[in-house]
Image (tube, helix red, strand yellow):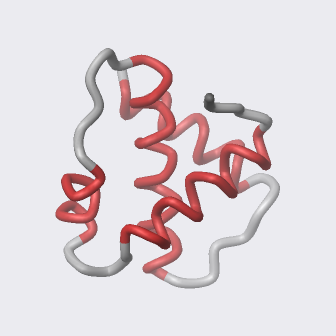
Amino acid sequence: RVAVCAIDIMDRYLSYERVTNLSEAYCVCLACTLIVAKLIQDELEEITDYLYIADGKITADELKLMEMKVSEKLGYVFI
C-alpha cells in the first residue's frame, strides 16, 4: 500500500517538476515514500533506513529538503 501511494504522489509531483539526475530521482522517490509513511503508518522508520536504501546517493539533509519541497508543491501540511 505504501509503494502504490508513494508512486501516486511521485507521479503528481513529477507533473510539476522535472528531475535532472539519478540522485535527485532517488531523493524524490524516497521523499514520497517518507510522506506516505507519515500519512498512513503508526510508527515511522528512522530516516537512516531511507538513506540506507539510497546507498549513499543522497544525504539526510537532501532527503528532508526534498520532503518539504514535495509536500509544499502538493499542499501537504505536517504538524
Image: 7 above or below 79: below
In screen coordinates, is 40 left or right of 16? Answer: left
What count of labels does the image hold? Answer: 0
Residue placed most toward the observer, 38 or 1: 38
Name the residue at the front extreme: 79
Residue 42, horizontal then vertical, whole percent: 31, 15
Q: Residue at the location (37% across, 28% down)?
A: 2
Relative horizontal placement of residue 23, taking residue 55 as reference (left or right): right
Quadrant for the C terminus, please.
top right
Residue 15 % position (x, y): 77, 52
Q: Is residue 39 above or below residue 74?
A: above
For residue 18, which quarter of the picture?
bottom right
Image quarter hosting the N terminus: top left
For this view, does 58 lie left or right of residue 27?
left
Task: Choose between 22 and 70: the one closer to the eye.
Answer: 70
Residue drawn 50% across and 59% down? Answer: 64
Q: Quadrant of residue 78?
A: top right
Residue 39 location in percent, x, y? 49, 22
